[in-house]
Structure formats: structure tokens, C-alpha cells
Amino acid sequence: MALIVQKFGGTSVANTEKILGAARKAIREVKAGNQVVMVVSAMGKQTDALISLANEITDRPNTREMDMLLSTGEQVTIALMAIALESLGHKAVSFTGAQIGIHTDKTYRKARIRSISTDRMENALKEGRIVIAAGFQGVDDDLNITTLGRGGSDTTAVALAAALKADRCDIYTDVDGVYTTDPRIVPEARRLERISYDEMLELASMGAGVMHSRSIEFAKKYNVLVHVRSSFSDGVGTLIGPQPERESAPACGLALAKDETRLTVVGVKDQPGVAMRLFSKIADAKIAIDMIAQSSSAEGRTDVSFTLQSEDAVKAREVVDSFVKEEGDGALGYDFDNNVAKISLVGLGMTKQTGVAQKMFHAISEAGVNIHMIATSDIKISALVGRDDAVNALRAVHEAFALHCEPTPEELEVESASACETPETAPFASGVSPKLLNQLAGMEDVVVEGIDLDSDQARVTLYSLPDRRGLAAEVFDRVADGRVIVDMIVQSVGRDNQANITFTIPRNELEAVSAIANEVCEKYKSEGCRAEIDAKVSKLSLRGSGLRSHTGLAYRMFRSLSASNVNVSVISLSERSVGVLVDEAHGQAGLNSLKAEFSEESL
Ligand code: ADP
Ligand code: ASP
Ligand code: MG
């Protein structure tokens, strides 16, 4: 007998007819001899409706009371689902988050799961009942109701699957799988047969709303196979597991985050510790920031830009405002742009191929769109563009990478060997190590899989380029012609409307790339372009999962480096890695300090 967790999202339970449809899907599994735990969301757009009600009263509602309010949406669905199952002749029981025993921390509206007690669910299953759990909610140590963040029912489902050591976790939704990009925006998008945990985590974290990114952290950590499928048809769906669909492809998908805000703190003293104080305040406010860029240093000061989701913008501006006041430094200020969107290309294959960034920037430029900011990590490239341009840019990049094309049977065959099979080991066994599980305080605590020092890097920075469409494409066209694998790329636009582009390359490519950099500078000499080449840099990186969205982690990395007097010049952030560029002379000291800082969480 297998144990299956089935999750039904809002549209899949939008009315009583659909609730009965979902109930029948559960009954089908029971008839096949399986045990079923259902996780359900609020009906239709009920969560939005509840938020609007509160906002009719105030735009700053108390967060504890918001969680009290929002949790009612799921409570309605669980009761109706139990009533539906009983009406169809099956024993069922509904549980709220508190009744199942989902214990969380106290961060209202973004609570993280600490533990799940499975006894009550297991007893109900033994009695032959279908268990129905409310998604998206838990309870803290003082029995206050908490919620896990918008879209959090996916996280409840995968976390329950992990805690119950379920055989499968099926996510039923209104699309028939994970697509190369949102099929509602790009109709040519293609359903993927499967996708790896790392790729799905990055896509979800960058805005692909089909899965809550934290659910994929759980799936990867506890090796839960997740199947995304349609509530309304019987297709094969998409399997999220350890393997990618094709390793040979540079990219598997594209995410669009429509509502982004860029914040720039201007006039930051270029000294170790100042930027760190800023990031620590943002991390304390549990705001996950994404693209980070520093513009060139003039008179010992730089501008630090970063992006975040617009829903956090009010809070972030308050944080920055208090930072500026506390530093008591007349030259400090900030500005923001809340009319931007972010496009992110994701794929495990891009780590091994040249020209991927160039192709993306080229496609965006050909679509007539200017790129405001660029940031990369090992398996993703993000470009910030004007919100009105975002869909055009998204379509153009999708087309350029031929993401709509089905893989050939040969491409699939080579890599499909173990992909769709259930791992031979039980779900927990090949995920996180038992040693680590015992050490950690909470199920959702971050895991650092490794800390690396790469001393084979060189940095190239082009300062004062004109901020115009096609510029990044031009620079990386030339680099790609030389077949050089570029690693970290950061582009930002400074106050003077001039762009700076920094990227790193393997040190043995330095000569060729220096020549290219000098050619570019020669062309834009009249604009004041200058190239800076540093052959003595090292990259320090943390590997793991959930590294970006666990907001305190990057901050701890910066703090630990700053305490050892290691200055950080370029930062790349993603869910599976955080990389920083440091002086080669400080590489080893930096590595030692990170090893000491993260010894508890490291495998
Ligand atoms: P649910 O209510 O079932 O949780 P969501 O609305 O949260 O459903 O997620 C499903 C939606 O995600 C789809 O309707 C689709 O518009 C959107 N989406 C965004 N990116 C993707 C993608 N890469 N693949 C499939 N759907 C996507
Ligand atoms: N009902 C919650 C929301 O709309 C949780 C979920 O559906 O996953 O965000
Ligand atoms: Mg959802």
C-alpha cells in the first residue's frame, strides 16, 4: 500500500462541483489500494478576497490578525472536502494546521515550518480515513495561527509528504504540468517531461508561480518526488526530481517576476562593514533581495542597487530610510524604481556552455528592450527591464533558446536512464544526512552542502559605458566569439546614467578577454569608458538550497568575511549558491572564516 499526498490549489476547489471532482481523485487512489492525505487551498480567489477586506479598513493590518483571517479560507475547504468525501461513501477527517501539528516560527505571513507531528494523521489513516489537511497554515509555540506565505499550500503538501515518508506528492493545479515559461503569457511554451529540483527551485524563486519555491527546498532536502498535474484532465504532468530533462540544453525555462522594485542606496562609504550593516537590516526584516550591484567607486563612495518583490517595497524603504538616518552621513541617500520586471533564464546546462548570456542579451536587445540591471549565478541569468517591456523580452528569449521545441528522442534517451524511476532508497535516505537532521532545530532550516574557494578567476570591469539598448549584447557577443565561459556577470546603471559591467572569467583566458575589453573601451572612449582588469581575485561560494530566501544566510556570510577583514567586490545570489569575489590574497582567510561560521549547518 502506497501513501500519496495530493494537493489541490484554489482553482481546483473553486466551487462545490470541483470539490467533488477532487474528492473523486482521492477516492480513485483509495480504490487502487493506497492511503491518501489531501492538502487543500482556499476556494478560488478567497485569499485575495480576505486580503481586500482587511485593506478596506487599513493598508497596514496587524500581521497576527491577518494570519487569523487568511487561515479561515483553507478551513472552509477542508470541511467541505470532508463533507464531499463522506457524501461519496468514504470515511474522512479534516484537520487545521494546528490540529495536524504543523509547528512554525513566529514570522506571521511568512512563517517557516519547524516540525510536524504525524501521530494524529497516522492514526486517522490507520482507521481507513482520507486525511484532509489545511494548506498554508501552522501554529507557533504560543498557539498563534501563522501562515507560510502566498502559495504556501504547496509547501504544506511537500512537507507532509516528507514527514510521512510518502511515496509520492501529487500537485493538482490548473495547468497540466510545469512549462518552459508561464503558458498563459507565452502560448508556445512547452510542458516539460521532468525538471530537476535545482532548476525548479530557481524558477520558482524567480517568479514561476506554478510552485511555491519553499516546497522545492523540502522536496530536494528530503528527496520527495513531486508530480505536477492537471486537476481537470488525466495527462502525465511533470515530474520534479533529482534529474533534469536534458543536461545538454543550456536552459530549461524562463521565469518572469512582473512586480519588482529596484532600490539604490547612493553614496555608500566603500569600506568593509557599511554595506553589511544595510544588508543585515534587510535580512532582519525577512526581506529576500535578489540582484545586487555596486556601481563604480568615486571619492571612496559607491551606489549599491538591489531588487526585491514589490510586495516588500514599503517595508524595504522603511528599512533603508532608518539605515540612512542611523548612519548619520549627509552624503547617503536612496532612490527606487517600482516599475521594473525581472526575466530569469534557468538551466543546469549553462554552467558548461559558452555564449548563453550573450544569446539572452541579444534576444532582449533585438526585441527593442533596454536592460537596466544584470545579475547571474551558476544556473541562472536575470535581466531587469521596464515592466511594460517584460512580456516582449520574455517571448524573445523563449524563442531564441527554442524552448518550445520538443527534445529529440536521442536527447531524452541518453539522460532518461533513472530519471522517472522512484529512487531505490526510501525518500529520506538519500536526502539530507541523518546527522544533520538531528542537529537542526527545524525542518525548514537551511542546509549548506559545501563551501568552495576558486582561485582561478580574473575580473574584468568596464566602467562608464553608455546606458543603451544592445550594449550588454555587444560586450558579450565579443566575449562569446572567443568561446570563453563567463561566470559572474553584474551590470548596473549609476546616477550618471552610465552602465558598469563586471564579469569573471577563467584566468587563462585573461589575455584574450583583456584585448576585447580594450577594444570596447576604445570604441566608447568619448563616453569615458575605462577597463579595469584584476587577475588576482578568488571566488568564495556556499552551496546548498534555499540560500537566497533564507534571508539571514547571505548576511551571515558577509558579516563573517567582514569580521576577518575580507572585502567583497561582486556578489551573486541564488537558491543553490551564494558567491562573492574577494582579493586572492584573502581567499584562504575567507574560506576559513566561512567554514567556522557554517560548521553547524554544513554536511
Ligand atoms: P494553484 O492555485 O493550483 O496553486 P497557481 O495559480 O498557484 O495554482 O499556479 C498555477 C499557475 O502558475 C498557472 O495557471 C500558470 O499561469 C502559472 N505559471 C507560471 N509559470 C509557470 C510555468 N513555468 N509552468 C506552468 N505554469 C506556470
Ligand atoms: N490560499 C493561499 C494563497 O492563495 C495558499 C495557496 O493557495 O497555496 O496564497
Ligand atoms: Mg499555487
Image (cartoon, rainbow, N blue to C red):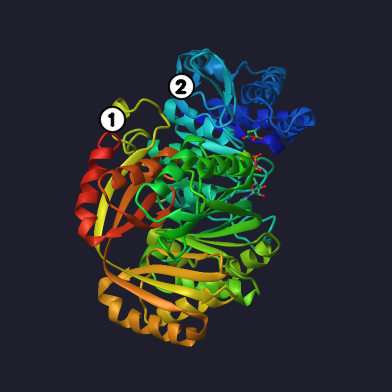
In the image, 210: left or right of 240? Answer: right
Residue 194 is situated, as x and y percent measured from the top left of the image, at 49, 52
In the image, 178: left or right of 439? Answer: right
Q: Could you say which quadrant of the image residue 134 lies in?
A: top right
Where is the C terminus found, in terms of image quarters? top left
Q: Tell me the tag on residue 434.
A: 1
Please tell me how crowded label 2 is: few (under 14), some (14-19), or many (20+) other residues with Cα within 10 Å.
many
* Residue displayed at 64% across by 71% down: 369
Ligand 3 visible in quadrant: top right
Pointers 1 and 2 in contact (C-beta within 8 Å) = no
Q: Secondary structure at mark 1?
A: helix
* Residue displayed at 39% across by 42% down: 555
Q: CA distance from mark 1 to mark 2?
A: 17 Å
> What residue would you read off at disc 2?
116
Residue 13 is situated, as x and y percent measured from the top left of the image, at 71, 32
Residue 308 is situated, as x and y percent measured from the top left of the image, at 56, 48
